[in-house]
Amino acid sequence: MLKKYEACLKRKKVNHSRAREAIYSIFLDNINCFMSVSELNKKLEEDYPKKVSINTIYRHLNFFVACDLVLLLQDDNKKAYYILVNKEAPVFKICPKCQIVAVEEITDKQQKTLCELVKPTKYQKAPFVVLHKVCERCG
Ligand SMILES: [Zn+2]
């Protein structure tokens, strides 16, 4: 994962930034976990000694998304959630009632089939599937 991150810095010709690295390590510590910007900000305040502005956090998040290191998912209220890309064609679910976002667990066989169906394109390098599914709490 860090290799992919380093490759991105090189490709985009950006310098190392401790704040950016701190944010990325939050993603590495929270695999399979969606985080909103405010959740990320809270975790960053716990881990990182300096104050990072929300604008800076957004800038770093946009960089991660542009590099396909992180996926951005918006719920029906346009609230943004971010998650680390750790596999091809991941499947997520959004509850249409409470808008909770989560990772949908699928079998290896299903994953394999999906990888064949959902191929990366020029426009979407890290494609994913979103299911609108009522969660256990609302169902
Ligand atoms: Zn729900």
Image (tube, rainbow, N blue to C red):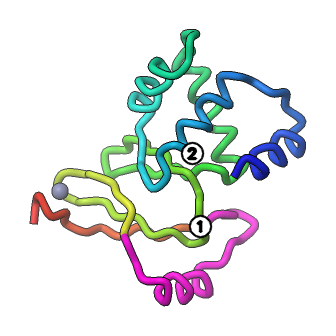
**Within 8 Å: ligand 1 and the Cβ of disc 2?**
no
* Mark 2 → mark 1, Cα distance in angstroms: 13 Å
Q: Quadrant of ligand 1?
A: bottom left
Q: Residue at x 63, y 38 (%)?
A: 62
Q: Look at the image and give the residue range highlighted in magenta.
A: 105-126
Q: Residues within 10 Å of mark 1 (few under 14, many from 20)?
A: few
Residue 123 inside the magenta-drawn segment: yes
**Within 8 Å: ligand 1 and the Cβ of disc 1?**
no
| Residue that label 1 marks | 87
N-term-proximal mark, 2 vs 1: 2
Q: Residue at x 32, y 52 (%)?
A: 76
- Measured as percent of width and height from the top left, residue 36 is found at 41, 37
Q: Nearer the viewer, residue 19 or 58?
A: 19
Give the quarter of the image for residue 38.
Answer: top left
Q: Which mark is residue 52?
A: none
Q: Which mark is residue 28?
A: 2
- Measured as percent of width and height from the top left, residue 123 is found at 70, 63
How many numbered circles are shown? 2
- Measured as percent of width and height from the top left, residue 24 is found at 62, 37
Q: Residue at x 42, y 50 (%)?
A: 33
Q: Residue at x 58, y 10 (%)?
A: 50
Considering the numbered disc 2 on the image, is that residue within a helix, a strand or a loop? helix
Considering the numbered disc 1 on the image, is that residue within a helix, a strand or a loop? loop
Horizontally, residue 46 falls left or right of residue 27, namely left
Q: Residues within 10 Å of mark 2 (few under 14, many from 20)?
A: some
In this rendering, is residue 137 above or below 43? Answer: below
